[in-house]
């Protein structure tokens, strides 16, 4: 009773002591300055949510990418470029495509063509910015192309076991209690369970038994005696026996340990013995709690008499997620390190999932609803597969990618399993961290090799143009607008100009003209080329693939895959097209109000070249138009006034299509200007009342596509005044998801590797649910694999099984 009371008093006093030490950390040491500088450049973490990991020929790899700033623990806010590289099993680059990341998210698809033979590939997601750092922050996932054939020749490997005994904090110290982590791997690099394990001394006396944990992990406590040696004896299910010695005892360096305590605190213990205390400067020791460039220094003088000096820290004083705890001596030399994961509330949120079978339309409506106290907007992606699928087996989810992978060395087997909601998660994860030792950031690099900015955030393609003749002083180069880029005018210097930040797709054409002070266009004599900024991707032959274990099948088996129709083989019925010569006269539109008859602007053929999309016309008339889906927005298009009204910032104008007010502007996304017959745009429209103060946009659809658009310059077509250049290394554009054409649904092949649905863009908020429809394949149950991130940085990974009642079908 007295000892428990003493410990509680000691805990309270050290809580106050710890808080005081945190507060007085104003005079940073050189080491802390070096640490802060090492994380001065923002770090990116990437996660790629694939709709599956096993694919068949003629399928698409559908994905959603999430890019996160590690220091801020929020989505990366800048618009940038994501590279998706696919490597063959030997690590050689097979294909590469690039995609636009906006507000930390991107989605797309990659076609599996006939050149991708069945077998193992590796998909990597990365940015140029990641090349600034020694640590590998890219995302890697093994994918498999499967076909109807035998799974391959099974190569029998001789059973072998790699047993690692890893003292907590890195050192085994005599005369004090040491916790030793156990890590057992098989011949393929996977964790191996063992039947029994015993620690013996040099006389063969059994000292203790070791109880195994999942994935080959275990731990035990031991107090080594200086005059004895110790061995660990392991017996496996195949009766193989392996004996390994315990690590050598260290008598010059203290070690650090972490113990979970009740009451929302952890105990940090500094372990030593009399030899260590007589060797080092006991008063100069300190502990550094650190994460992503932020450090908290705590002085920890050793007790002269005790082998364990302990203090407690409130979890509220720790960082959420991963904490690295390093012990230093008086000369800033790192002595011992321990990783600890703080399960804070903001690490997760939840969604509710429900379904409704629509018998008439033969579809299923899936509804997602926000749960929990986290009310910030969320951006999610969902893959829907048969429940017994063999086609979805990722190593990581978004939680392990953001909270675990950046801080650990090497490759961790099935890291997502530590975040699957199991009650043993905390204990199993701490056991993993106990065996890790040092984090992925080495103090040698921190003190001597800080990152240097050799690569910028890659923001679009850069096109360089060179005029082949000098132009007049009143002439400039006009760049016509494209789908993602506004039109602009450039004044060349020495007949040269550079156009950066172009988010153009591959083979998309950029058009150039010379424009004079009267607005007249002429064709330039121009040489154009792209300025490539990407360093060639490094093959992964000798690095990554060797560290990703591949579990071999226990026996040969025939893979049963879905029966599909190759879309390229679908024959179309013969269609006879009859053309009628188009008229050129546009009759007055009766839908246009009389007061606008003289103010309406008719779209001409010239307009369609100058302004290919309706959004370009709106921009040219004084409004700010933002395209693409922004984080947590519900529309791909936003239109705002260039002027700010009051404290609420810029407001949106009234937008009408054929005199119907558009409450959702998605209809304007990608709408070409030649679909509009006429328009009226006014930045201040008094006739629309108080709501017209921010402007009005009235668009009128073309009524007859057999009528040619008028031209303001019939003698010389405007296209003769344009020089065009097709982008060679542009961006891949995401297609709308489509289901593969299966000949049979609900057979074994479909259950094994079939695809039901992929939904890459789901926005949830506090008071808003999201629904989407999927085809009803008459499968008894389906599984939703949900990944996502919230506006405040919290992330979710959830697997939801839905049992379906298809008895009426």
Image (cartoon, grey):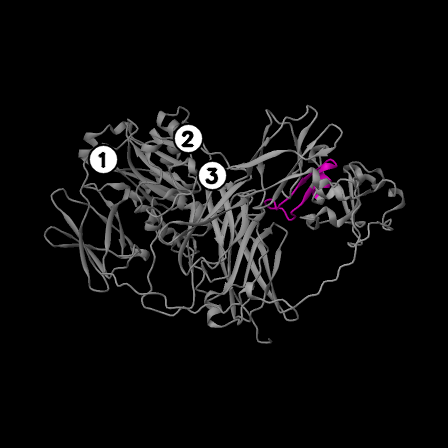
Q: Earlier in the sequence, mark 1 or mark 2?
A: 1
Distance (Cα) linking label 3 and label 1: 46 Å
Residue 533's x, y, as percent?
Answer: 49, 36
Q: Secondary structure at mark 1?
A: loop
745 lies left or right of 337: right
* Quadrant of the image occupied by residue 473: top right
Q: Nearer the viewer, residue 136 or 726?
A: 726
Task: Answer yes or no: is residue 466 visible.
Answer: yes
Q: Which mark is residue 408?
A: none
Q: Secondary structure at mark 3?
A: loop
For mark 3, what is the residue? 534
Give the answer, above or below, for where 229 lies relative to 527: below
Assess whether residue 636 is covered by the magenta stretch.
Answer: yes
Q: Residues within 10 Å of mark 3 (few under 14, many from 20)?
A: few
As rendered, which of 666 and 679 lies closer to the eye? 679
- The residue wearing badge 2 is 452
The percent coordinates of residue 438 (x first, y second) are 31, 40
Query: Tag 2: Cα neighbours inside 10 Å, few (<14), some, or many (≥20)?
Result: few
Q: Are marks 2 and 3 in contact (CB under 8 Å)?
A: no
Q: Which residue is mark 1?
A: 253
**Left or right of 234 on screen, residue 444:** right
């Amino acid at each position: 009773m007295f000892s428990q009371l003493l410990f509680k008093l000691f805990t309270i006093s050290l809580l106050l002591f710890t808080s005081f030490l945190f507060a007085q950390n104003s005079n940073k040491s050189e080491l802390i300055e070096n640490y802060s500088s090492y994380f001065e450049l923002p770090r990116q973490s990437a996660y790629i949510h694939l709709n599956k990991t096993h694919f068949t020929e003629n399928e698409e790899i559908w994905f959603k990418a999430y890019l996160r700033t590690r220091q801020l623990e929020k989505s990366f806010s800048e618009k940038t470029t994501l590279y998706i590289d696919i490597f063959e099993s030997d690590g050689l680059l097979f294909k590469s495509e690039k995609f636009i990341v906006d507000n930390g998210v991107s989605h797309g698809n990659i076609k599996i063509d006939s050149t991708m033979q069945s077998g193992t590939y590796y998909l990597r997601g990365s940015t140029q910015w990641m090349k600034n750092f020694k640590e590998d922050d890219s995302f890697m996932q093994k994918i498999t192309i499967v076909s109807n054939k035998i799974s391959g020749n099974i190569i029998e490997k001789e059973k072998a076991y790699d047993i690692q005994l890893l003292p907590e904090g890195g050192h085994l110290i005599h005369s004090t209690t040491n916790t030793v982590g156990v890590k057992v791997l098989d011949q393929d690099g996977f964790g191996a369970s063992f039947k029994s394990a015993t620690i013996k001394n040099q006389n063969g006396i059994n000292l203790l038994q070791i109880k195994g944990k999942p994935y080959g992990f275990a731990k035990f406590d031991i107090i080594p005696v200086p005059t004895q040696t110790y061995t660990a004896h392991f017996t496996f299910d195949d009766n193989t026996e392996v004996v390994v010695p315990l690590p050598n005892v260290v008598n010059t360096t203290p070690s650090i340990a972490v113990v979970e305590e009740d009451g929302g605190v952890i105990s940090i213990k500094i372990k030593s013995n009399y030899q260590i205390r007589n060797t080092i400067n006991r008063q100069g020791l300190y502990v550094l709690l650190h994460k992503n460039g932020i450090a908290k220094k705590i002085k920890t003088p050793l007790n002269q008499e005790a082998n364990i000096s302990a203090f407690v820290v409130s979890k509220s004083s720790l960082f959420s997620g991963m904490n690295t705890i390093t012990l230093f001596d008086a000369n800033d030399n790192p002595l011992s390190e321990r990783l600890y994961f703080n399960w804070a509330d903001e690490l997760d949120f939840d969604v509710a999932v429900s379904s409704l079978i629509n018998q008439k339309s033969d579809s299923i409506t899936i509804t997602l609803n926000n749960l929990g106290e986290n009310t910030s907007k969320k951006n999610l992606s969902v893959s829907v597969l048969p429940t017994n699928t063999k086609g979805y087996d990722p190593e990581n989810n978004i939680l392990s990618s953001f909270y675990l992978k950046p801080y650990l060395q090497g490759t961790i087997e099935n890291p997502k399993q530590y975040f699957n909601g199991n009650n043993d998660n905390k204990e199993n994860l701490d056991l993993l961290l106990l065996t890790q030792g040092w984090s992925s950031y080495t103090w040698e690099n921190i003190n001597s090799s800080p990152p240097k900015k050799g690569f910028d955030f890659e923001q679009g393609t850069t096109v360089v143009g060179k005029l082949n003749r000098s132009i007049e002083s009143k002439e400039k180069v006009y760049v016509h607008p494209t789908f993602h880029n506004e039109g602009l005018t450039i004044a060349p210097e020495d007949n040269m100009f550079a156009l950066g930040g172009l988010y153009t797709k591959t083979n998309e054409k950029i058009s150039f003209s010379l424009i004079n002070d009267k607005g007249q266009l002429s064709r330039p004599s121009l040489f154009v080329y792209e300025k490539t900024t990407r360093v060639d991707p490094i093959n992964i032959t000798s690095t990554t693939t060797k560290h990703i274990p591949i579990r071999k099948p226990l026996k040969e088996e025939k893979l049963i895959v879905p029966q599909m129709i190759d879309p390229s083989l679908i024959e179309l019925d013969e269609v006879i097209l009859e053309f009628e010569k188009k008229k050129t006269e546009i009759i007055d539109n009766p839908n246009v109000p009389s007061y606008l008859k003289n103010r309406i602007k008719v779209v001409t053929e010239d307009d369609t070249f100058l302004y290919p999309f309706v959004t370009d016309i709106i921009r040219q008339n004084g409004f700010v138009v933002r395209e693409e889906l922004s984080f947590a927005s519900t529309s791909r298009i936003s239109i705002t006034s260039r002027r700010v009204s009051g404290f609420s910032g810029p407001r949106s104008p009234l937008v009408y299509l054929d005199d119907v007010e558009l409450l959702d502007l998605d209809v304007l996304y990608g709408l070409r200007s030649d679909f509009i017959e006429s328009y009226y745009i006014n930045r201040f429209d008094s006739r629309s009342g108080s709501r017209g103060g921010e402007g009005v946009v009235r668009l009128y659809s073309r009524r007859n596509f057999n009528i040619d658009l008028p031209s303001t310059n019939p003698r010389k077509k405007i296209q003769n005044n344009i020089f065009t250049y097709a982008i060679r290394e542009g961006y891949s554009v995401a297609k709308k998801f489509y289901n593969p054409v299966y000949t049979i649904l609900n057979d074994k092949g479909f259950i094994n590797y079939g695809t039901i649905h992929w939904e890459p863009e789901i926005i949830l908020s506090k008071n808003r649910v999201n629904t989407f429809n999927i085809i009803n394949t008459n499968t008894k149950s389906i599984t939703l694999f949900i990944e996502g991130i919230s506006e405040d940085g919290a992330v979710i990974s959830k697997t939801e099984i839905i049992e379906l009642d298809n008895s009426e079908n």
